[in-house]
Image (spheres, grey):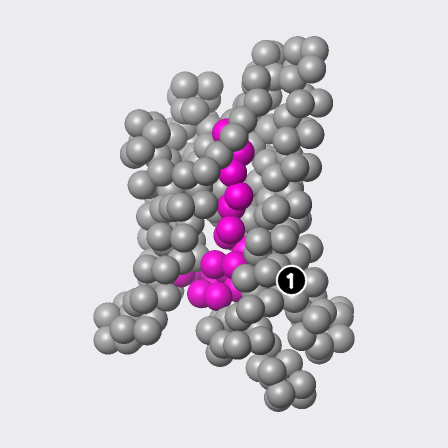
Amino acid sequence: MQIDSAVLSQTVLMGSYGVALPLVGAFARRIGWRRLATSSSEFHLWAICAVGLMVLWSVRTGVTAGPALHVLGVTTVTLVLGVPAAALITFLAQGVTSFIANDVTGLPMNWLISSVVPITVTELWRRLTLRCLPHDPFAFIFGAAFFGAALAVAAAYLVGLAFVGEPGMFRAGAVPSWGAMLLLVGFPEAFINGAMVTLLVVYVPERLAGYDPAYRVRHRL
């Protein structure tokens, strides 16, 4: 999701800076920078995730009123790298996307909505999945990945809608059109993230930071 900073008030923009910058610092302190610098495989994984997000976010659509919509892909990155790394990589990807869109002013707000919100939802849903569902690879794939991605993108767009809910947003036909686009984007979001996590669970489960080792031990995956 990309919200034009021109539709946001100065109070909202300044508030987003006040929230985003401390969060970036907090996430950065939780990263093992020495391991990242010495492990080429770890660095390559970061680079692949960052480039993948930039490509996904460059393909977008929109409606008459409201933000530009695109596949987030944040659920997969969160399950692969964990919350702190996912937050920093999405901040980098959002920075590049905002620079290309010539809207660097809106970087913190767009990062909070398009990245922090879905990352938080993904992590909370993953924990709930591990706690409530059987320790089965399919439960993880469909619970944490497919449904987690759908919930994450829905939460991000609902929060975004709350901030761009200007009078023009609610004129005749605007909200139904935006809601229809949300449904159309939500399905590929769940499918793409679910498919990617499925491949990782089957072939390289050790690359999934959010994958409980108990799944691999019990089911030889």
- Residue at 54% across, 26% down: 62
Residue 103 in the image, given as x and y percentages of width and height: 34, 28
Query: Taking the image as drawn, is residue 159 in sight?
Result: yes
Question: Could you tell me which residue is drawn at 42 percent across and 49 percent down?
Answer: 53
- Image quarter of residue 15: top left
Answer with left or right where residue 155 lies relative to residue 97: right
Front residue of this view, candidates 194 and 150: 194
Q: Which residue is mark 1?
A: 144
Q: Which residues are magenta?
A: 68-85
Q: Residue at x 66, y 11 (%)?
A: 171
133 or 59, nearer to the observer: 59
* Amino acid at dot 1: Ala
Secondary structure of the residue carrying tag 1 is: helix
Label 1 neighbour load within 10 Å: few <14, some 14-19, many 20+: many
Q: Is residue 113 visible?
A: no
Residue 155 position (above or below residue 177): below
Front residue of this view, candidates 218 and 86? 218
Question: Where in the figure is residue 158, as x and y percent of width and height?
Answer: 63, 35
Q: Is residue 34 above or below residue 183?
A: below
Residue occupying image coordinates x 55% and y 48%: 118
Residue 58 image point, x, y percent: 41, 39
Give the image quarter of residue 88. bottom left
Principal secondary structure, stretch drawn in magenta: helix
